[in-house]
């Protein structure tokens, strides 16, 4: 079964949307196989967003993601990447469809509430970065 790394970002924790985000994935029929509350270090945040290192918004992004605790999760299910990315919505919440997490709950690019892996290979790397194998259900 395919797995994805999903994170409730600091704005989601601060705005008390963690339960709402989990509820959406649970009611869709996905399986939660790992979860932890963690205040990410700069090193972890930079590694997680390494692909964006050269982008002008990289520093702001790392500052934001290290600004408070996040809820790091691994979810499992059929076509997990497509299903979770569709449920999360467009990167810029202004363009995110109603019914998506970002489209219902966010309006700013910098505060878009949730991260979801964009491919199975990315998911594998992100899961290994945030979790040890013993922290995940078999
Ligand atoms: P994604 O989160 O939808 O996968 P990515 O392109 O991987 O979007 O970008 C990672 C995060 O970086 C986004 O969620 C958003 O918070 C931030 N970001 C992306 N593009 C921009 C931008 O053009 N300006 C500011 N922040 C951005
Ligand atoms: Mg991305």
Image: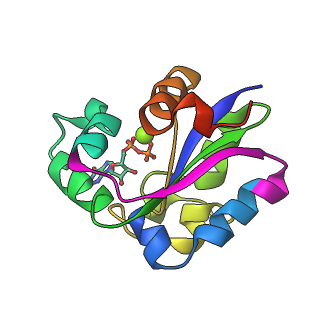
Q: Which corner quadrant holds the C terminus?
A: top right
In this view, 103 is above or below 40: below
Left or right of 13 in this view: 55:
left
Q: Quadrant of residue 81?
A: top right
Give the x, y percent position of residue 103.
Answer: 57, 65
Left or right of 12 in this view: 4:
right
Q: Residue at x 77, y 36 (%)?
A: 77
Residue 2 colored magenta? no
Give the x, y percent position of residue 128.
Answer: 48, 28
Give the x, y percent position of residue 38.
Answer: 43, 57
Residue 29 colored magenta? yes
Left or right of 138 in this view: 71:
left
Q: Quadrant of residue 137?
A: top right
Q: Read off the magenta span.
A: 26-42
Q: Which corner quadrant holds the N terminus?
A: top right
Nearest the viewer among 106 and 10 is 10
Left or right of 51 in this view: 14:
right
């Amino acid at each position: 079964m395919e797995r994805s790394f999903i994170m409730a970002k600091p704005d989601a924790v601060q705005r008390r949307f963690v339960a709402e985000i989990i509820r959406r994935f649970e009611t869709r029929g996905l399986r939660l196989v790992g979860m932890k509350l963690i205040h990410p270090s700069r090193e972890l945040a930079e590694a997680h967003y390494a692909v964006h290192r050269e982008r002008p918004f990289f520093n702001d992004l790392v500052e934001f993601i290290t600004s408070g605790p996040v809820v790091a999760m691994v979810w499992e299910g059929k076509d997990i990447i497509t299903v979770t990315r569709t449920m999360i919505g467009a990167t810029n919440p202004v363009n995110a469809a109603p019914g998506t997490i970002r489209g219902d709950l966010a309006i700013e690019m910098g505060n878009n509430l949730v991260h979801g892996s964009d491919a199975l290979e990315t998911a594998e790397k992100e899961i290994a970065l945030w979790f040890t194998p013993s922290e995940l259900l078999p």
